[in-house]
Image (cartoon, grey):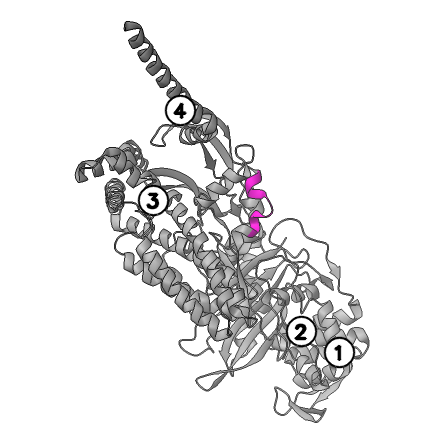
Amino acid sequence: MYRNRLLVILGFAALLLCLVAARLWHLQVVHGSEYEKAALDNRIQVRILRPARGSISDRKGRLLAEDRPRWSVSITPGLVLDLQAAALEIASAQGIDQDEAVRMTGSGWGRRVPAEVVSMREAGIRRCLQGTAEILGVQAESMAAAIRAAEEDILDSESRERVRVVAPAAAAGADLGEARSALRTIEREINRETMLAAAPGFLLSAGPRWDLLDAAAAKRKELFAGFASSRGPDASGAMRKLADAEKAAAIRIARAARTRSHVLCEGFFGFERILRLETALESLPGVSIGSAPARIYPMGGCACHSLGYVGFLGWTRSGAGEVNRYEEKEESGFFFDSVSSFMDREEYEELEASGEFLRDLFGRTGAEAMFDADLRGARGARLVECDRLGRIQRTMRIDPPVEGKSIALTIDAELCEASARAFSRRLCPDLPEGFALRGSAVVLDPWTGAVLAAVSVPGFDPNDLLPPVDASKAAEMFTDPGKPLLNRAVSGCYEPGSTFKAVAALAALKEGLLAPGEIIQCGGSYGKFGHTFRCNAAFGHGDMTVENALMRSCNVFFYELGARLLDLLGAHAEAFGFGAPTGSGLPGEKAGSLQYGITPGFWVHCAIGQRITATPLQMARFAAMIANGGSLVTPHLHGPAAPAADAGVPPAAMQPVREGFRLVVHGAGGTAAIPSLVRMKAAGKTGTAETGRKSGGVSLNHAWFIGYAPCDRPRFAVAVVIEDVPHGVHGGEAAAPVAAEILGACFAVFGEAE
């Protein structure tokens, strides 16, 4: 009997051992790699180290942009709640088995997650926000608003993806851009209503509010179907695309809600506050502290358009659609390559999906964008061992980031500030009361093409555009009628007016269609090609040589040159750099317009600078060409000068034009005979270009001055344009005094003699 009992006990023990062995085999062999990865993910983590962006200085070493450390506090909703503790609390409250509560809770983020889990997580988030706010001295509600803004960004990202997928089918062969625009409008309205319905709570961070998301999906289906059916009888293709997109979006939204880290606040907090927060992290699950270099512009708005600013890379319009600029840049492999020794591509993409790189800054405009690849450096990484709260216990390996290169620009900060101040009504008394000067000025070294100053008025402070951007300031900038963000120096296209007469003179002299010293009579009008063209002097200027015609800005003289040159005028304008970018590489540079006329009368108008457009940078380059005797320099902001191109103008053709420029300032009756320009031995040409626009019944013109100084040994070439001056105010009265102030600043900054 005892033997039988012993056998039963041994058999039972053997069965238990078999069960344990089977379980061990299941855990270690079948799912061993999964658990190993999960354990390593919990214990061993890769922390991305962001590089400091290189500094930007002017030609004398004055800092225009630099990086300084900035603290950021983030929260990861997926780490806020301990699910085991939550399941235990639910089991106790409902009187159910703990295993059943664990089963009900699941991952804590599914569609059927108990409402108690959502409530507990939201309460946990609120506690974290309140505790963090008290330590840092900020408002808890502002941090809650930051979470809601991050949730809205997630929705907007999915909206763009849906539109990208559905729009081609919904367009039904019609205008794709129109379809995208209409569907984006629908998406924005639905997202706005969904966020409002979730307020003042959270839509995603406490657990996706599937009731609201499903309601939004139903409304989206209805509106998308209505739009698609209005474009064609069969909307089923678009609806199938939408259904597939909705399924994929739900997966991505759930993952983003759980894993994405949201920045609650950032700034230059005192180290004492950060230390207090660090010691309190035990009671603030999900909260983490980071520091990253922050961009600072010490001189504020000085040279703001040349300098540019940094920001996040988002979506930008490309043709009829929109593209993700970050994804475009990433195709080069730059971002992944620098950390590829720490992780594989799949792990890197998981970090991307969790929002790890959403806060990276890139150059958006100006030099920040132009030299972005050099300035931003390369990411580093650190392999760390963490405890269960994510706190670093030890560093296992580190590859430090590579700091970006520092860039010295050719501009002079002092000259840029003086140039911006020169746009003052004090210098232009002929302008009407209340007139706000808007325009641009460019100063070049006429021998190398170095940009010494390039200003656009009005300007802005790049510090106001650093993330997080104040919404009210951003709205003010984008709605300001003065367009402060527009870089008029390279993107402003204006009719050059009489400054273009120098192009006609050089072309005619070079082609032999105008002999040096040849006289053309001006009687106040010019009749040809079935039309009468009026001079700017009602009774005419009398007998004019090219020098006097430039000095007095006689229209009739240049009407005649336009009639002689015809298409040759366009060919020479191209050779002098018009109708194409200058090669500066500055972001946003426009080519201006140089079209060939259908009728001969077109060239008559073109010869006096109408029906074409040019940028201030192109005009400064043209002035530099006259100053240096015929070399077409390439404007540049950094680095050595590119070899100048020979414009092919012989000295015999250049000399009369240079003399005409001198007489504009120094001759009796010159249109820019300003004492300060005379003292500086300047030379130049004024211009007043008709725009065809009116304000209050008054015609508007553009006022120009281009020139150089001193006229015998040119050191500075300048172009100034003032927008929309009222009829009756000319370039010599508005733009020339501003140019005189700027040239005076050039001599003050660089000295009277080399």
In this picture, residue 98 sits left or right of residue 471: left
Q: Compared with residue 523, is residue 400 higher up or lower down, i.e. above or below?
A: above
* Whole-number angstrom distance, CA of label 2 to CA of label 3: 61 Å
Q: Residues within 10 Å of mark 1 (few under 14, many from 20)?
A: some
Q: What amino acid is found at the position of numbered circle 1 in the picture?
A: Asp
What numbered label is drawn on residue 594? 2
Label 4 sits on what residue type? Arg
Q: Which residues are magenta?
A: 328-337
Image coordinates of residue 719 in percent, x first then y, are 59, 67
Residue on which the image places disc 3: 109
At numbered mark 3, what does the secondary structure look like: helix, strand or loop? Answer: loop
Q: Residues within 10 Å of mark 3 (few under 14, many from 20)?
A: many
Q: Is residue 111 visible?
A: yes
Sequence order check: which comes first, mark 4 or mark 2? 4
- In the rendering, which numbered label is found on residue 23? 4
Which secondary structure lies at badge 2?
Answer: loop
- Of discs 4 and 3, which sits in the foreground? 4
